[in-house]
Image (cartoon, grey):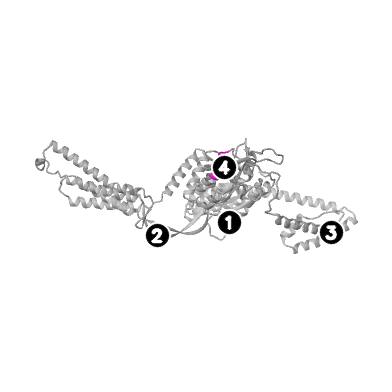
């Protein structure tokens, strides 16, 4: 609300300002009643002799000043703002693709009001809490379509989600693999758009799949393997009931005119398949939830996303109004202090005491204004972190994970909060994630010049790498921890690091001795084979000479080729007792040509709607 060039963030408090005169009138009425009551006890002509310090004008003045103070206090609570400034803000968050099933089966009404309407409501609630993240939207049925690329304009994504319907794609059916493949391509393009920006931490990417699970295609395993290769997690939310229901058919006015039938004329009853969706989530290193009426599963989903590392997308200029609530708040405090110092009766004024009181009031006001810009989010992050530490100590890992995630959302750059996330991953035996997060915590601590925290993070990173059998990486982590610990010595930590390094070196030496033993066995075997070959006849020796000559020529050809090409030829080497080398080369060339033609044909066919046996 804007009045005379001043913007009020909470204009409802202006009504309280308007009510201040009512307070003043009410106060005057009470004072008049007190005076009348006092007059009944003692007649007014003798007041000056009996009570010489009595002055009824002083309470009225105090009331006047108090009402003014309350009015300015209400004005400050309305948050007045004027003047603008431009600030550069960094956008931090995750890359998230929503992959939504829009097949005809999603129109079933076994979930109130329908599976599709329930999904749209769930997406809106999710977008309200995904502030700062880049979110995209993919619709799929028999094929898929990218409806919204990755964007921070979540209002646009929400409006697009409200239009989801079976006609959002060109072919019906349920091909989950097509939706996941389109989402993967969109995430890769988003990563390319963000690759040129200087980010402090890599952006975590994830996919949220919402479907009823009735997959009619078989490509999903291949797509999931590609997602795992790209280190993408898939979170699956199933919608529907296992009992299922028919699929209504509606006319252009939205009235139900019947139900979907298959080719044999029977009414189609679409069922919810949680088993397939749960397997998909497990294979893709994600989690599965079934959508409930209360949608409490959204809290768990946001907790999972909160544990991922958040990167910086870009810098953008934001126009910010300047807060001016400090001015009326300071006036209100001064008036209140002045009202407290006003006498209620005639007294001799001690100027020295008033001067001391005014100086104390000035110091208090200066301290209050200096601390008025303290950030509430840091306090909230501290509280959530403390609760998480207590839960972790009580072995309540799920609660601790949620608390640490909430704290990191409030303060995403805190190295201590990243360190705590690493402890959660280590407790859950997710050693890859633990090593990655501990590394990020160490880097952040080094930037903040906190060598003690950096040393502890590198020490725990060494533990995580040891657990996943990465001994070389563990040694590097421990050595880096020793270097950081030298800046802020911690005798106990140094002792632990050196003990673990000693154990690692012993383990590596044991592996080396095992390797030497295998090499010796191999040499003995080679000598034995050589002795057996020397026992063969002349014809065999001549054949071996010819073979060695051919192998030598082949090795020269391989040396001229790039290593990756030689490796490829090694994998596809054609061996036959009946074909000559020239014939085999011709056969392999023909196979390569046919494979290339097939790939070109598949590229041309990609994106075309394929007729499915089931179109729901």
Of residues 430 and 398, the one drawn nearer to the viewer in this rendering: 398
Query: Which numbered disc, 3 or 1, marks the residue that appears first in the sequence?
Result: 1
164 vs 327, left or right, is: right
Q: Which residue is mark 2?
A: 84
Give the x, y percent position of residue 76. Answer: 33, 51
Q: Are marks 4 and 2 in contact (CB under 8 Å)?
A: no
Quick one: label 4, few (<14), some, or many (20+) residues within 10 Å? few
Judging from the image, what secondary structure is the residue with disc 1 in? helix
Quick check: 320 above or below 118? below
Residue 428's tag is 4
The magenta stretch spans which residues? Answer: 111-122
Give the x, y percent position of residue 170. Answer: 65, 51
Judging from the image, what secondary structure is the residue with disc 2 in? strand
**3D distance between C-alphas at marks 3 and 4:** 55 Å
Q: Is residue 116 magenta?
A: yes
**3D distance between C-alphas at marks 4 and 2:** 48 Å
Q: Characterize the magenta stretch by its predominant secondary structure.
A: helix
Between circles 3 and 1, the one closer to the viewer is 1
**3D distance between C-alphas at marks 4 and 1:** 30 Å
């Amino acid at each position: 609300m804007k009045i005379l060039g001043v913007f009020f963030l909470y204009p409802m408090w202006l009504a309280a300002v308007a009510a201040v005169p009512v307070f003043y009138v009410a106060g005057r009425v009470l004072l008049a009643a007190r005076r009348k009551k006092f007059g009944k006890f003692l007649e007014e002509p003798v007041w000056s002799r009996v009570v010489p310090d009595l002055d009824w004008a002083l309470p009225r003045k105090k009331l006047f000043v108090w009402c003014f103070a309350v009015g300015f206090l209400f004005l400050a609570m309305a948050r007045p703002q004027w003047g603008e400034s431009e600030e550069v803000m960094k956008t931090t968050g995750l890359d998230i693709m929503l992959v939504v099933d829009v097949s005809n089966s999603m129109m079933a009404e076994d979930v109130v009001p329908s599976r599709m309407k329930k999904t749209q409501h769930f997406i809106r609630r999710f977008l309200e809490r995904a502030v700062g993240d880049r979110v995209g939207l993919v619709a799929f049925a028999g094929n898929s379509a990218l409806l919204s690329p990755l964007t921070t304009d979540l209002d646009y994504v929400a409006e697009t989600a409200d239009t989801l319907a079976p006609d959002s794609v060109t072919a019906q059916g349920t091909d989950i693999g097509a939706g996941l493949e389109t989402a993967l391509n969109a995430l890769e393009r988003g990563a390319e758009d963000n690759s040129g920006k200087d980010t402090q931490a890599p952006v975590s990417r994830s996919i949220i799949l919402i479907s009823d699970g009735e997959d009619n295609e078989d490509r999903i395993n291949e797509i999931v393997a590609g997602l795992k290769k790209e280190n993408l997690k898939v979170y699956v939310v199933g919608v529907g009931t296992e009992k299922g229901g028919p699929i209504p058919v509606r006319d252009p006015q939205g009235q139900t005119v019947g139900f979907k039938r298959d080719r044999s004329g029977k009414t189609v009853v679409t069922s919810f398949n949680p088993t397939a969706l749960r397997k998909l989530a497990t294979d893709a290193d994600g989690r599965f939830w079934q959508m409930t009426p209360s949608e409490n599963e959204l809290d768990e989903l946001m907790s999972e996303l909160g544990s991922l590392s958040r990167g910086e997308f870009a810098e953008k200029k934001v126009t910010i109004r300047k807060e001016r609530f400090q001015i009326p708040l300071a006036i209100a405090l001064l008036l209140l202090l002045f009202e407290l110092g006003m006498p209620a009766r005639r007294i001799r004024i001690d100027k020295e005491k008033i001067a001391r009181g005014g100086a104390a009031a000035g110091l208090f006001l200066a301290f209050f204004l200096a601390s008025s810009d303290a950030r509430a989010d840091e306090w909230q992050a501290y509280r959530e972190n403390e609760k998480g530490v207590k839960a972790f100590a009580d072995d309540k890992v799920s609660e601790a994970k949620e608390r640490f995630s909430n704290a990191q959302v409030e303060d995403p750059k805190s190295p201590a909060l990243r360190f705590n996330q690493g402890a959660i991953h280590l407790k859950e035996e997710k050693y890859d994630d633990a090593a990655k997060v501990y590394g990020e915590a160490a880097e952040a601590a080094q930037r903040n010049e906190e060598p003690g925290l950096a040393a502890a993070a590198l020490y725990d990173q060494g533990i995580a790498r040891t657990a996943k059998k990465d001994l070389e990486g563990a040694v590097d982590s421990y050595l880096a921890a020793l270097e950081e610990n030298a800046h802020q010595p911690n005798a106990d930590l140094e002792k632990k690091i050196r003990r673990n390094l000693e154990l690692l070196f012993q383990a590596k030496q044991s592996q080396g001795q095992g390797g030497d033993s295998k090499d010796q066995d191999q040499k003995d075997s080679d000598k034995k084979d050589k002795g057996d070959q020397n026992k063969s006849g002349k014809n065999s020796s001549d054949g071996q000479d010819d073979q060695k000559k051919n192998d030598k020529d082949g090795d020269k050809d391989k040396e001229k080729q790039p290593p990756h090409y030689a490796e490829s030829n090694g994998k596809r080497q054609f061996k036959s007792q009946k074909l000559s080398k020239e014939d085999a080369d011709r056969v392999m060339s023909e196979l390569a040509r046919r494979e290339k033609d097939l790939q070109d044909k598949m590229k041309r066919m990609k994106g075309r709607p394929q007729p499915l046996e089931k179109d729901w």
